[in-house]
Image (tube, helix red, strand yellow):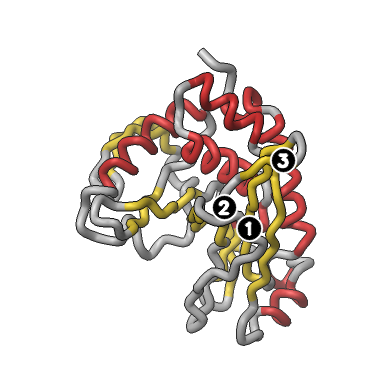
Amino acid sequence: MSSVSLCGADGIPYRCEVEWGMNEPRRIDLGSWPRREAFELFRGFGFPYFNLTADVDVGPLREAVRARGTSFTVALVYVLARAANEVPELRQRMRGEGVVEHAAVHPSITVLADDGTFRFVTLRYENGFGHFAADAKLRIERARRVASLWSEPDRDDLLFMTAIPWVAFTGMVHPVPLDPPDSVPRIAWGKYRDVGRRLAMPLNVQAHHALVDGVHVGRFFGCVERLLASPDEALGAAA
């Protein structure tokens, strides 16, 4: 294990513990993969994606971030990334004719720039909300000022995330390239509102059906709901 100084494509340096040789994704043996038949079926579809939208209760998370004085958006992104990383199928990606599984995937979010357009910014997911939040703040602030739309292109160890905070939507379809098809999951959330005793927020997931089924998205939602209900578990105890 070695500690090295790294610099992201957006120019922000960070230090990272690296175990050399462990950063390459695991290649899945299609010959023994139980999902092989479903993979072959759905990857041949013209539009091989499905999406699901459901409300989640963000009331406890909002109260927790208010008490901590931290960003609701950054905390939510961390929760969603943590939940997605707990579902192996959401870490799998198609590469050519094969499939790989990443050890970890990182949120790539959209942020509004100073000129009213948006930018992509990749946030480095790691266990430990404090480090994640500090790094995210720097990256988001810089992304708002740079001229380029892109943060780190040509990576597939990502989770594409976006917010539509003006609309309590009930469904959403994300734009995706189809040739070749993109297998990075898309996650979106909308405007939260009071529903009874809950602060309900729409959460949407779109995934490539050759890799992900409804049961896997269900596990993701279950993990999200557990973490949102217990912010101290999700973010660590407040200082």
Instruction: List x then y, in percent, for residue 237.
Output: 59, 17
Q: Is residue 224 left or right of residue 165?
A: right
Disc 1 crowd rating (10 Å Cα; few below 14, some 14-19, many 20+) is many
For the residues marked 2 and 1, what is the alpha-carbon distance in whole angstroms? Answer: 9 Å
Q: Residue at x 52, y 43 (%)?
A: 77
Q: Earlier in the sequence, mark 1 or mark 3?
A: 1
Mark in front: 2 vs 1 = 2
Q: Residue furthest top?
A: 239
Contact, CB < 8 Å: mark 2 with mark 1?
A: yes
Q: Is residue 59 visible?
A: yes
For the residues marked 3 and 2, what is the alpha-carbon distance in whole angstroms? Answer: 16 Å
Q: Nearer the viewer, residue 39 or 235?
A: 235
Judging by the rendered image, the residue that carries numbered circle 1 is: 204
- In the picture, the disc for residue 194 is none
Q: Residue at x 49, y 80 (%)?
A: 180
User: At label 1, which amino acid type do we have?
Assistant: Asn
User: At label 3, which amino acid type do we have?
Assistant: Glu
Judging by the rendered image, the residue that carries numbered circle 2 is: 190
Q: Nearer the viewer, residue 226 or 12?
A: 226
Q: Which quarter of the picture shows residue 120? A: bottom left
Q: Residue at x 43, y 32 (%)?
A: 133
Instruction: List x then y, in percent, for residue 139.
Output: 32, 42
Judging by the rendered image, the residue that carries numbered circle 3 is: 225
Q: Is residue 99 left or right of residue 178?
A: right
Q: Is residue 45 left or right of residue 1?
A: right
